[in-house]
Amino acid sequence: MIPNSMRARDRAYVVHQQTNLRSFEDEGGLLITGGDGVYVVDDEGRRYLEAMAGMWSASLGFSEKRLAEAAHRQMQTLPFYHVFHARGHEPAAELAEALLAIAPCAPGAEPMARVMFHCSGSEANDTAIKLVWYYHNAIGKPAKKKIIGRVRGYHGSTVATASLSGNATMHAEFDLPLPIFRHTENPDYYRFHEEGESEEAFSRRMADRLEELILREGPDTIGAFFAEPVQGGGGAITPPARYFELVQAILKKYEILFIADEVICGFGRTGNMWGSQTYELRPDMISCGKALSASYQPISALMLTQRIHDAMLDQSAKLGNFSHGFTFAAHPVACAVALETLRIYEADDTLGHVRAVSPLFLEALSRFRDHPLVGDVRGVGLFAGVEMVADKATRRPFAPEWKVGERVQRACMGNGLFVRSIVDRIAFTPPLIIRPGEIEDMAARFGAALDEVLADLEGQRAA
Ligand code: PMP
C-alpha cells in the first residue's frame, strides 16, 4: 500500500538517527515543518519551544532571513566549488580568516593559524585524529598514536569518532572502539564525588586517574587527549573547579596533544565565544561546527596551531601529496552562510545577549532544585543539565526500567517543549537569541512536565 500522508511516508522510507527503530516502525514520529524564532511547528500545527536549538545547534533560531539571503546570493555566484588540488574560492578564504580572528588564545598558548573545513563535527574530529597520527609521524614519534577520550564524552558517529566517544552502548552496538582508543573517567562531580569531597579534590582525583592511565599505557604511546569544554551528549556536564588546569598540566608533562571539541560550546554557548575561554584551555587543535553556520548549512571547521601545520608541511615535503579531502568540505554556500552567521553574531552582539539572559536562564532552572524529582541543576551560559533522582539526599538514581528521563522528555513534548533526556538528565541548550519571556515560557512548560511525571510516578509507586 502506498503511504497516504507525509508522516506515513517518513515512517515507510526514512531510517532515523539515534532512534528506537522498532518503536518508530510501530508508532512513527512527527515531522517538523517550520520555525519562528525559538519555536518550531509540526505537521499538525503544534508549536514547540526548541530548548535544544534542534541539535544543540540552531543558535539564531529557525527564521533568520539574513542567512537565507546569504545562501541565495552565493548560489547565484558560485554554487559549488571545492578546495582540492590547490584550488579554492573566496568564501572559504574569507571564512578561514574570520574564524582565526576570533579563535581563542589563552595567555601563553599558541594561536590557531590554519583552518580545515568539513561538513560535520564528526568529520572535523575524525580528521583531527588522522592529524594526530600524521603529526607524530612527521616529528619522528610514530609510536605516539593512542587517543584518549572520556567516558560519556561525545565526538561523533564515524568509526573513529564513535570509538573516541565514551558511550558503552554505542560501542557494543557497532563492535567498537577500535583498539587504539582509551577512555578516562567522566568528571561528573554531582554523580561521582565521594561524601565530603570538594570539587577541587574531585578534579585532582580525575586528573590522577588520567595520569595513571597514561603511565599504564606508556606515555610514549599516547598521541592525544580530546575533551568537550562542557560535555553535551554525556549529559550537559560542566567541568568541576580546576579540572582542566590539572588535566592540561599532565598533558604537557607527557607531550600529549590536546584537542578541544568546541562543536557545541563554540560561538557563545558558555557565555564566551569559546568554551576554551570559559575554562582557560590551551588546545593544539579546535573542532567546531553546529553554530558556525547557526546550523543553516552543514559546515564544521578544524583549527590548527602553526606548530601542527609546520609539521604537516614537513611531512608533505617528504611524501608529496597530503592525501585527504571531502568533496563538500568548504562548500561555498555553507561558507557564505557561516560568514554571515559570524557577521550577525557581531552586529547583533549575540554574545552580549547570552551574557545578559544567562543569569535568568540558570535561575529559572535552579528553581527546580526544590522539585521532588530533581537532584541537581548545573549550567553555564545557555547550557544546562537537570538531573532527576530517586533520593535527593543520597543522590540515588531511579531504576533504569522506570525510564524517568525519557518520561520527562515525552511530558515536555506534550507541553510544547523540546528538551533532550540523557539517561535521567535533561539537557537545555536553547537558541542563543532566546528572550527573557521565552525563558519563563520554557521553565513553565518544564515545570508542568515534571509535575505530570511526578504524579505518574506516585501513582505507580502506590499501585
Ligand atoms: N562533538 C560534539 C561535542 C557533539 O556534540 C557532536 C554532535 N552532537 C559532534 C561532535 C558530532 O557532530 P556531527 O553530528 O555534526 O557530526
Image (tube, rainbow, N blue to C red):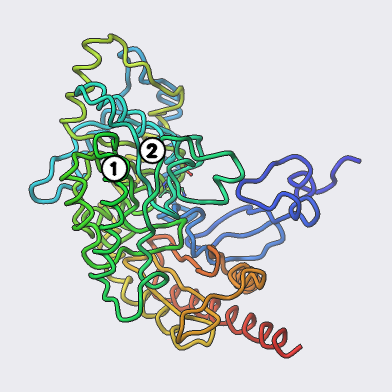
Q: Is residue 384 left or right of residue 141?
A: right
Q: Does the beta carbon at disc 1 come under 8 Å from ligand 1?
A: no
Q: Position of residue 214 (x, y in %)?
A: 28, 45
Q: Is residue 408 left or right of residue 177?
A: right
Q: Is residue 210 above or below residue 2?
A: below
Q: Residue furthest front?
A: 216
Q: Is residue 51 above or below residue 366?
A: above
Which class describes the residues within 10 Å of circle 2: few (<14), some (14-19), or many (20+)? Answer: many
Tag 2 residue: 125
Q: Residue at x 28, y 71 (%)?
A: 356
Q: Residue at x 66, y 65 (%)?
A: 46
Tag 1 residue: 259
Mark 2 falls on what kind of element? helix
Q: Look at the image and tell me in which quarter the N terminus lies.
A: top right
Q: Is residue 237 above or below residue 12?
A: below
Q: What amino acid type should be assigned to the residue bearing mark 1? A: Ile
First of labels 1, 2 by sequence position: 2
Q: Does the beta carbon at disc 2 come under 8 Å from ligand 1?
A: yes
Label of residue 251 in the image: none
Dots 1, 2 in contact, CB < 8 A: yes
Q: Residue at x 63, y 54 (%)?
A: 32
Q: Nearest the camera: 93 or 183?
A: 183
Quarter of the rendering containing residue 454: bottom right
Q: Position of residue 143 (x, y in %)?
A: 29, 28
Mark 1 falls on what kind of element? strand
Quarter of the rendering containing residue 424: bottom right
Q: Is residue 403 above or below residue 126?
A: below
Q: What amino acid type should be assigned to the residue bearing mark 2? A: Asn
